[in-house]
């Protein structure tokens, strides 16, 4: 690795000041499981690591019954799946945190970093989208909020300006009779990158009642994680039947724009979108029916 | 308060295998490089350099970590266990003994990583199922043994260690 500087600010204001002063080659360091590897392989040039792990807002993991979940950008996956409230309220998020990499990766890697790395196959992003998550961004020009489905703009690229950082992700309070599930298909059983990933959420009027809201998001089948609005909208007002799920899955398939690469052909990916969307919807339904709030 | 920007050689202190330890390193050095090249703790190995193989596993503040994916400067104030902190040549831990007796190693390159990972598992869960063991160890790659004997060694050690 070429010579690099390091700073560990203890406040958001200091972090913003560092990014502003250092220019485009400063990067926030959270878990480091993508960034350190990329810099070591000369795939990314960094002049200054700004360690985010001493900034309280980036390490926060709190649930408020009115406002929902605040997930700091640098919170590691292991804290997500060990948190009893997150496990109960946001199991779709726990699905992803449990399968990113393996144990040692999950000790450091963060969902915020997964989003900012902006890989098309990021596991946690489809689940964040299914939960209608919003990204809180801070910079010298102030703070702004971006829905997660609008965050990634191209492979490895996102809406952050060079002097901005992701502070945290905000997931609304899950309504009664709602559930979400993330599923992926990978070439091995574990420690691999998704060939296809699907995050789905459902809100029902009552147990097994008509669907009042649904969100479906796909990973690894487009240059960015894909929010397929029409697939979720097609379910609203319907009973959660296999036919309804099949129709939503077909819409998800139609929206997918996969490429052929070493993990799978475009045709196989299209097929998997259909299968995983149906299964993720069934999983979301099961959770929607089992939640007692 | 403005944050200081560290460059060149940075002084870092941590506790390694129970011993207060200080070193100088540049921000670009990974913890693995620090352990091996500056501290002479060559038990942790570099197998891949990118977080896939687990040969560099250490335990940081109770968490299993790939030391190749962490900077040396990030270890400031941390409590670190490396493979050198597990047992000693005259007194192997049950885990180490079960590995040896169960032929859970051949070339031995992955073994430090597996021992650290297995120790982290058994510290947290003294009675893991086979599935839990395999999932926990998914980040440790072995080219020699086919994994079965490693899993059995962990099971045997766990059984021996349970009251």
Image (cartoon, coloured by chain):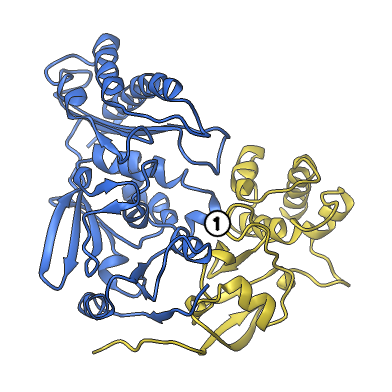
Chain colours: A blue, B yellow
Q: Nearer the viewer, residue B9 or A124?
A: B9
* x, y percent for residue A54: 34, 75
* x, y percent for residue B84: 74, 72
Residue A288, picture quadrant: top left
Q: Is residue A42 above or below residue A82?
A: below
Q: Residue at x 77, y 39 (%)?
A: B148
Report the residue that reaches farthest toward the top: A243
Q: Is residue A140 above or below residue A108?
A: below
Image-based side of B89 in relation to A22, left or right: right
* x, y percent for residue B127: 65, 47
Q: Residue at x 73, y 62 (%)?
A: B112
Q: Quadrant of the N terminus of chain B?
A: bottom left
Say what secondary structure mark 1 lies in: helix
Q: Which residue is mark 1?
A: A104
Residue A160, picture quadrant: bottom left
* x, y percent for residue A258: 37, 29
Q: Quadrant of the C terminus of chain B?
A: bottom right
Image-based side of B86 in relation to B125, left or right: right
């Amino acid at each position: 690795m070429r010579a690099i500087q390091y700073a560990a600010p203890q406040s958001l204001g200091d972090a913003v000041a560092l990014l502003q002063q250092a220019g485009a080659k400063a990067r926030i360091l959270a878990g480091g499981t993508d960034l350190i590897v990329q810099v070591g392989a000369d795939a990314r040039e960094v002049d200054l690591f700004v360690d985010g792990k001493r900034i309280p807002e980036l390490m926060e993991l709190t649930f408020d019954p009115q406002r929902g979940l605040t997930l700091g950008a640098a919170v590691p996956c292991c804290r997500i799946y060990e948190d009893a409230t997150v496990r109960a309220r946001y199991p779709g998020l726990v699905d992803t945190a449990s399968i990113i990499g393996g144990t040692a990766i999950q000790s450091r890697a963060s969902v915020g970093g997964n989003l900012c790395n902006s890989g098309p196959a990021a596991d946690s992003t489809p689940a964040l989208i299914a939960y209608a998550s919003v990204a809180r961004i801070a910079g010298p020009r102030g703070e702004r909020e971006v829905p997660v489905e609008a965050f990634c703009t191209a492979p490895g690229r996102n809406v952050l300006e060079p002097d901005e950082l992701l502070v945290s992700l905000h997931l609304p309070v899950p309504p009664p009779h709602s559930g979400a599930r993330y599923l992926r298909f990978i070439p091995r059983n574990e420690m691999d990158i998704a060939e296809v990933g699907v995050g789905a959420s459902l809100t029902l009027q009552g147990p097994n009642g008509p669907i009042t809201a649904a969100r479906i998001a796909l990973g690894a089948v487009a240059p960015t994680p894909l929010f397929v609005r029409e697939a979720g909208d097609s379910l609203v007002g319907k009973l959660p039947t296999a036919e309804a799920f099949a129709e939503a899955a077909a819409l998800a398939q139609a929206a997918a724009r996969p490429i052929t690469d070493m993990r799978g052909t475009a045709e196989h990916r299209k097929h998997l979108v259909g299968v995983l969307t149906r299964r993720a919807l069934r999983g979301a339904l099961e959770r929607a029916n089992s939640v007692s709030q | 308060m403005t944050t200081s920007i560290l460059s060149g050689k940075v002084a870092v202190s941590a506790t390694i295998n129970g011993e207060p330890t200080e070193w100088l390193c540049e921000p670009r050095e990974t913890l693995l490089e620090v352990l091996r090249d500056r501290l002479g703790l060559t038990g942790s190995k570099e197998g891949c350099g990118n977080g896939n193989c687990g040969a560099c596993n250490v335990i940081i503040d109770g968490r299993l970590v790939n030391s190749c994916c962490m900077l040396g400067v990030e270890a400031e104030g941390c409590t670190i266990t490396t493979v050198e902190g597990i047992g000693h040549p005259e007194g192997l831990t049950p885990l180490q003994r079960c590995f040896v007796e169960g032929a859970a190693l051949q070339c031995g390159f992955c073994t430090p990583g597996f021992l650290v990972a297995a120790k982290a598992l058994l510290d947290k869960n003294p009675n893991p199922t086979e599935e839990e063991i395999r999932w926990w160890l998914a980040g440790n790659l072995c080219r020699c043994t086919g994994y079965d004997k490693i899993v059995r060694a962990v099971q045997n050690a766990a059984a021996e260690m349970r009251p």
